[in-house]
Amino acid sequence: MLVILLDNPFKMTQKSSKTLFLLDAFALIYRAYYGLGENFLYNSKGMNTTAISVFTDSLMKMLNKEKPTHVAVAFDMAGPTQRDTEYAEYKANRQAMPEDIAISIPYIKEILQAMHIPILEYEGYEADDVIGTIAKKAEKDGYKVFMVTPDKDFGQLVSQNIKIYKLPFRGNPEQILGEDEIKAKWEIENVEQVKDILGLMGDSVDNIPGIRGVGEKTAIKLLKEFGSVENLLANTAQVKGKLREKIEQHADDARMSKKLATIVTDLPIEVDEAEYALSQPDKEKLGKLFADLEFRSLGKRLLGDDFSANQQQPAPSQGQGDLFASEPEAKVQPVVEAGKNIHNTIHHYHLADSKEIQERLFEHLKKAHAFSFKTETTTGDPNNCEITGIAFSFSEHEGYFIPIPAPPFDSAQGDGMRSGIPNEIKEAFENEKIKKSAHDIKFDVIVLHHAGVQVNGHLFDTMLAHYVIDGDARHRLDLLSENYLGYSLLTKEETDSETGRRKKVLLLEDPASVADRVLEISDVSLQLKKKFEPLLKEHHYEKLFHEVEMPLVNVLADMEMEGVGIDLPFLKDFAVQMDKDITELREEIFKEADTQFNIDSPKQLGEVLFDKLKIPYEGKKTKTGQYSTGEEVLSLLQREHPVAGKVLLYRGLVKLKSTYVDALPLHVNPRTQRIHTSMNQAVAATGRLSSANPNLQNIPIKTDRGSEIRRAFTTRNEGYVMLSADYSQIELRIIAALSQDEGLIHAFKEGHDVHTATAARVYGVPLNLVSREMRGNAKMVNFGLMYGMSAFGLSQRTGLQRKEAKEIIDNYFAQFPGIKRFMDEAIEKARKLGYAETIMGRRRWLPDINSKNFTVRGFAERNAINTPIQGSAADMIKIAMIKIHEQFAKKQLQSKMILQIHDELLFDVVKDEIKEVESIVQHCMKTALHLEVPIVVEMGVGRNWLEAH
């Protein structure tokens, strides 16, 4: 049966042309497994599902987009192959298959079987040979064949009706490579010569030797002259110099390499049209597999209502969560007194649009010991929106939604406040005896504050609770509902990718059409609170949650509401000056290049640098055949020609202007004329805060122009000054305390410059003889080792020979043995416990810490070392912020904390309060955590951020 896919990959219709997609299973599975870097995916059982998830998702997207009529997947079989017999060293350098992939293979095969996609294997031969044989036979039978693989060897098979199909990867779209593309890539006359290219240059991945010393460029050059390996070997007398010696010496290797690289196309395999035809899957089997793997979103996307998230209700994940979180179309249900949702759970959701229901809500609020709530707003910006309603939940599956402004029944409208929030609701929020919970509660606290309502009492944020439980996972409410409650929300709102907050909500929307959605959020938050409270207790997270993360909510809310002053006239003048600088620099580049061109075009820039100016080019070209002109390439080229350095300066200025000088005024709040960044508390797994809309933590400071941006951030008025308080080398102080290394502790206690002191010990010279270069190398080691920097990394960063870099690191560990001991013990502890933790007990789960694959294990080992250091620094400044906020309130100061930038705090200080504020800030920052090393806080005062910093 011939089929074509529609929007659902299993909906079929007749199609006359025949298209066969042949998938190279292991090549795609390995690419899927490593494609997310270290962001592996885990389900609640601790199983690494990355390979299964990404492979299945890629397969489904390909089927939807390309709509083939026939599909098959080829696997390598276990055991020796014909190539192993002919060359014992074939693929000898390959690592053993990672256990996570080995575990994934049976699941992938089961999914393919449930989808009725045939699995092809042939004993003694590789998947390449199976695909090659079937591709050539199918072509003769009138098929258009697409070989789905990233493997370059398949270029030799390409013909008019056989092409390579490369799946999308890391932001790059899919690619279809035919004869023209293969010929252009290798600069060859016909695709058969791909085998000759590989025969000459070999393949390190498969341990195919080729001719030692012959790379891609030389191989192409030789083929242009001789046409084939055989013709080259028959005419070596025409080759000059050492190259001739290499070719003659390794002639047998070249012949063997070409044979190893040749894909077999004549295996005794028949093309089974009926078996390869895409057909309806076994939905029941597929549903069970997806439920077992916890692919809830994927299951619903593929199987719709046939897949129920109630099939399994998993415990919390210690990993990244479900990869497949696609956003289905919104389903709007009317608000009813008693209705059922898609999982047949009875909900009692009430719209308080009558006096009777409103009074019932007020009665609940008076008697409540606790409630969950959610505000509905006109935008996702809490500092620039209107509140349009509030949902309350007092028990599971029940709730009340009251539109705002509330209908004015009797005296409920109260004193006619601008927001239209009834006094009964205001009193409930401000009652400190009533506990409140919500998801992303800071958003609601800010919204209600602007509406004249203070949210007091014990607060519980389900987003932050899950962040504490599993910092590496995602904390969106829809995912948590599916993972912990087995319940899918009726709608998934459009969210901002960086903050996770709503981008927009329709203004003047009918209350009845949004009530169910907002009530559901409130209800689910209440249910999740009941799930998370025992988990926080069980894993001893209560102190971190209740004493750090939750108290910080009000601190950050106050900071966001306060905002920071911005000098718009300065930015305007600065933009004019930068335009002038950019124009002058552009003219200088044109003069150096002796031509005018589009500097912003990598293609034109590459042509000018390497074709016109003849600067030697040693890098690889891009996939489209262009020269690479990235920052690394240009940095190396500065020595060859001054134009490269000027292009780097030009790019830096253009980016600085567009990212900050032009963009910052767009973030000014029209109500306050200040910038109100959003401080994200549940993003970084280390515990660090991040900033968005705009991101004020990435403002560059290493260049003069970059530093000038900080001049734009100013005090509220002439009666204020700006105070900057910055922890000095806090992460190094923490590693000294954690490692108990006597040498490093001594350096800090004596007040020495720690990098100079480190260099003195490593190089064995007195402090006064430490050169600038020595200090720089020591600084690189001090900061680099906690991030897993190797001798190779140090040599790359400093220009040292690798042997010298290794000697420096060896000397470092010899002089500071406590640090090496701490690093080893941190890794060993993580291996035993499965996680690393900070001084405050914040855990980062490391499921790959015992992996047999050194690459993924290396990621986990670096996090095992880094988490106690960076995570403890993050906890420390959070505690300091809480203490400072408490003291400001206690002393009723008018000064405000306005920004946190990594290890720095920024304050808008009333001039008369500066001495008192400095004293409070110094004390709170120094005593936030007790460490056995002195804590230094560097402070500065000025009219703007640059002067203060």
Image (cartoon, rainbow, N blue to C red):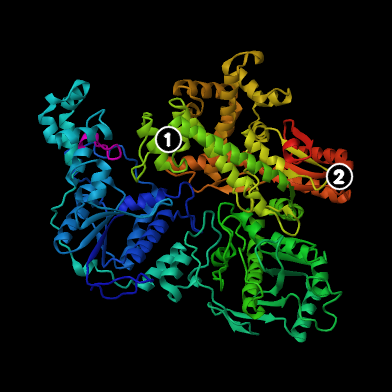
Q: What amino acid is labelled 2 in the image?
A: Gly
For the N terminus, the quadrant is bottom left
Badge 1 marks a residue whose secondary structure is: loop
In front of the other: 29 or 796:
796
In the rendered image, residue 579 lying in the magenta stretch gets the answer no
Q: Is residue 680 visible?
A: no
Q: Which residue is mark 1?
A: 595
Residue 815, position as x, y percentages in the image: 59, 21
In the rendered image, residue 200 lying in the magenta stretch gets the answer yes
Residue segment shown in magenta: 199-209
Q: Which of the 4 image quarters holds residue 920?
A: top right
Q: Which residue is mark 2?
A: 719
Residue 772, position as x, y percentages in the image: 60, 19
In front of the other: 411 or 751:
411
In front of the other: 784 or 570:
570
251 to 681, vertically: above or below: above
Q: Which of the 4 image quarters holds residue 922?
A: top right
- Tell me which secondary structure the magenta stretch mostly adopts: loop
- Mark 1 vs mark 2, foreground winner is 1
First-in-chain label (1 vs 2): 1
- 528 relative position to 910: left or right: left
- 551 relative position to 778: left or right: right
Residue 216, position as x, y percentages in the image: 27, 35
Q: What amino acid is labelled 1 in the image?
A: Thr
For the residues labelled 1 and 2, the Cα–Cα distance comes to 54 Å
For the C terminus, the quadrant is top right
Q: Residue at x 61, y 64 (%)?
A: 502
